Amino acid sequence: MKIAMVGSGYVGLVSGACFADFGHDVVCIDKDQGKIDRLHAGVMPIYEPGLDALVDSNVKAGRLSFTTSLAEGIQGASAIFIAVGTPSRRGDGHADLSYVHAVAREVGETLANDAVVVTKSTVPVGTGDEVERIIRDCAPSHRFAVVSNPEFLREGAAIGDFKRPDRIVIGAEDEFGRDVMREVYRPLFLNESPILFTSRRSSELIKYAANAFLATKITFINEMADLCEKTGANVQDVARGIGMDGRIGAKFLHAGPGYGGSCFPKDTLALLKTAEDYDSPVRIVEAVVKANDSRKRAMGRKVLEALGGMETARGKKAALLGLTFKPNTDDMRDSPAIAIAQTLVDAGVIVTAYDPEGMEQASPLMPDVTMCDSPYAAIEGADAVAIVTEWDAFRALDLDRVKALAHRPVLVDLRNIYRPDDMRAAGFAYSSIGRG
Ligand code: UDX
């Protein structure tokens, strides 16, 4: 089957490469000539483990190609995926649908065969109806259906998530749409991945509800962590204790500095806007967004405390280990590190940092922070070291070396990757999250 993937960003490229790997004939389309040129040269526009090899093998097998021409790329495709960005609209937090609508228009104007148009971009309820209207207005003479098929890929684990999904959600309004989608996902059908067929509107809402629920789970455990610190309980035990209840589940209960990334912050805001538009408040999600925002600066204050408090922090030095919103990505979007660094800089602290992949993206976001070549270079002379992102490279630091290099052996572990007893035995003044 021929598949066209419009938008070769994170979702489009990973999905396109995986579909090609299933044996489909995939064309990835993007307006950005530079990106397409780099892809032709085998250079990935994003950092995602395993993606370069997957792209390379499928290009060599002749199943994956790239073009800037939508009109050319969609010809003969039975499924045309829209996988362009839906960023938060400046000013109001609504999802910006201008790219989705523009693609729909171009598809409508150039479609030359029967096809299913599949929205993979995260879009508010009702967007599929609008996409259908736009295509119909352009009056193609061909049969088409508009289907919703949200993605649930995690950065850093995207290929595994695509090939072994917890579920595939397909929102279709007619049999033509369902039939083509069955064919698209046939290899996963055969693997017995659960596939949920539902209405287009339900499918669109499922994506937002899933992300808002996960953001709520994280924020819940983060607030429990604060309570643990005040009451002398241990949040990891609390998470384990509640997670063993099958109704709650153990995943997404790691307390930390707050969620970031390309999805949770943007999608929770967009859900609030939809709720407002439909006059149907989602108060829990409102509280989650507020709590997560204030948590990020609170984490900066936690590092300030380790430096001896706001009054004495000026002129002291803090080292941040990890800047990306999570490990195995170079993505800095809404990373807690940004607010943490800003809080420290505002208090007159000299900040150094190291991140295995994120420093290029981080530099313009934190111009006052000195980026270093290694964790140890960042730690040199530090009055406090803070682990902000749980990269594997920080899980087994040479603690003697850290102590010898740092000005004071103070470690703030915002991801709980070390054990308090071990760290105290190693001679560190150690603080972490929710382990009173
Ligand atoms: C998320 C969803 O998981 C994915 O299904 C969706 O398609 C896109 O958004 P992603 O943003 O890549 O994926 O990262 P994820 O692993 O979900 O982590 C998001 C944020 O939550 C990170 O900042 C992470 O550090 C934080 N987090 C996650 C926690 O603080 N605690 C947890 O237990 C889990």
Image (spheres, grey):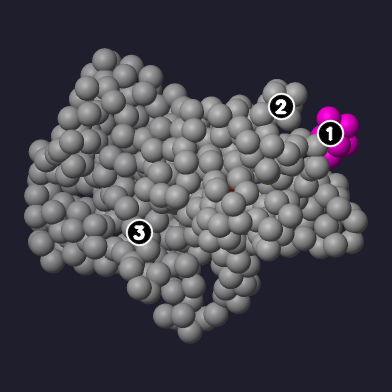
The residue at 22%/36% (across/down) is 35
Density class for disc 3 (Cα within 10 Å; few <14, some 14-19, many ≥20) is many
Label 2 is placed on what type of residue? Ala
Q: Is residue 151 visible?
A: no
Density class for disc 2 (Cα within 10 Å; few <14, some 14-19, many ≥20) is few
Residue under circle 1?
Answer: 427
Q: Which is in the foreground here, disc 2 or disc 1?
A: 2
Q: Which mark is residue 404?
A: 2
| Prevailing secondary structure of the magenta residues | helix
Could you tell me how far apart the alpha carbons at marks 1 and 3 are, in whole angstroms? 46 Å
Q: Is residue 55 visible?
A: yes
Residue under circle 3?
Answer: 87
Label 1 is placed on what type of residue? Gly
Extreme bottom residue here? 279
The residue at 29%/50% (across/down) is 84
Q: Which mark is residue 13?
A: none
Q: Which is in the foreground here, disc 3 or disc 2?
A: 2
Residue 249 in the image: x percent, y percent? 74, 49
| The residue stretch that appears in magenta | 420-427
Mark 2 and mark 1 lie on one chain; the one further toward the N terminus is 2
